[in-house]
Amino acid sequence: MAKRTIILYGFILLKFLLQYVLCNPAYDLQRDEYLHLDQANHLAWGYASVPPITSLISCVIRLLGNSVFWIRFFPALFGALTLVVVWKAIEELKGNLFALVTGATCVLFSALLRLNFLFQPNSMDVLSWTTVYFLLIKYVNSPNRKWLFLISAASAIGFLNKYNIVFLLIGLLPALVLTRQRGLFLTKGIFFPVALFLLLILPNLLWQYHNHFPVFHHLQKLADTQLVNVNRWDFFKEQAYFFLGALPVIIASLYALLCHALFRKFSFFFWAFIFTLAVFVWLRAKSYYAMGLYPIYISFGAVFLGNVLQTGWKRYLRPVIIAIPILLYLLLFKLVFSVQSPADIVRHRTNYQKFGLLRWEDGKEHALPQDFADMLGWKELVAKVDSIYAKLPNREGTLVLCDNYGQAGAINYYTRQGIRAMSFDADYINWFDLTHAYSNLIRVKWADARGNEMQETSPYFQTALVADSVSNAYAREFGCTIFAFTGAKVDIRKRIEDEIERTRNGE
């Protein structure tokens, strides 16, 4: 076996190992993961928040036993494949062994380690961006139409995983127009690859059409509640954090693409970088949306540095370039990964504040990073809902209704009572079973939304009580209240139908 292959396998093995050990057992799954896992029970060509590929992966996870091991495996796999694609891109660019090790090290010891920890579309999104860029390199080096078809297929798979890949295309098109490489793509043969792309994404587009394009409602809600709090300067700062150890390599790549004859035919990559970031900034996108942009530029930078750091005193900079991402990882991994308990994080909160890690999507600072708070309190919530459910009369006629998709998904994942919780949030609004009447209601209310639940709902039932609440003070669900209503006096399905209609109309 070749030396390079052995080294690559070593990086892949280390990648998987780190993805499984960098988590404190105090944490549960993250709220988004529960929704994605539940989509396996409701297969469709689209969902309110994401395209269909995540649900297919959820199906595979369910067939494998639905354990945390397999939930962690697939994002880790996509992260490892991203590393492999960067490695192959460096080989395609004629990089030496130093370039290969530099590229793999920069990808491995980066924010991708945290991203690849969560079962979300983001890990495959980064892989899709990197793969499309790699295939562009292949096509520029060897203008064979097969690469155009593969670019179309990779773009379509990326689109069916996360619509975010559209920004890759938006940034790439003007970059090609500005450079001489446009001639490679402005050919009669481009029609068929474009047609292939449209054909592959057509089922999802038709689903969006028949469901009145819920993606636009989702994006509007996102813009109103989260993106409005995005600070454009913070966006730029956080870009540097994602690949902090790789910054010298990425800067070298941008210089080489713009100024060095070695990469003149790839100059459109420089402009694609500028245009893509500009679009993200203009739209106030979340900073992590741009993470797929960087791995391929690590490839260019690693090859460039591998060529210029070969002789004289410059060769002594090689171990420094490789050591930087490793040392920064060792210094910062406690801040970036959920290896510390919530109590330890609170005790050292100033360290997290320096990097803006306590600032949530609402624009405010909290005790824990948002992702960490989103991984707490779920098992407690489900255990209490299960206990309440087990004591109810006529349990089969019980509706468990939650305020958000995290609550509903967590209950459906952890329950030992066979509960199928519902919500008016996200995709759950399409999954209600209204074929039979309900005699009981367990209402799970977020702390900030408890309002007058008892006064509003109790008249429709014979008995009503505040049954329990989430007591984990570090959880985002802290104070979440569980109400129990039994003996329905009326058929509550009409109220549910009315609420579904109001929610779909954005009221």
Image (tube, grey):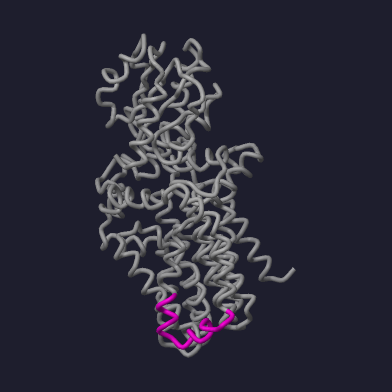
Q: Position of residue 216 (x, y in %)?
A: 37, 52
The residue under the point 64% across, 66% down is 7
Q: Nearer the viewer, residue 233 or 358?
A: 233
Q: Could you say which quadrant of the image residue 9 lies in? A: bottom right
The residue under the point 48% across, 62% down is 326
Q: Position of residue 502 (x, y in %)?
A: 33, 36
Question: Quick one: which residue is furthest to the bottom in this view?
Answer: 261
In the image, residue 139 sits, relative to residue 229, either above or below, namely: below
Q: Is residue 403 left or right of residue 40?
A: left
Q: Is residue 175 part of the magenta span, yes or no?
A: yes
In the image, residue 184 sits, relative to residue 417, either above or below, namely: below
Q: Say which quadrant the N terminus sits in.
A: bottom right
Q: Is residue 390 part of the magenta span, yes or no?
A: no
Residue extent of the magenta highlight:
173-189
Q: Which of 231 and 256 is in front in this view?
A: 231
Q: Where is residue 94 in the image (x, y as percent from the top left)?
A: 60, 81
In the image, residue 282 sits, relative to residue 423, either above or below, namely: below
Q: Is residue 82 left or right of residue 362?
A: right
SS assignment for the magenta stretch, majority: helix
The residue under the point 49% across, 49% down is 120
Count of labels shown? 0
Q: Where is residue 427 in the image (x, y as percent from the top left)?
A: 45, 40
Q: Could you say which quadrant of the image residue 260 lies in? A: bottom left
Q: Nearer the viewer, residue 139 or 16?
A: 139
Question: Quick one: which residue is furthest to the right in this view?
Answer: 1
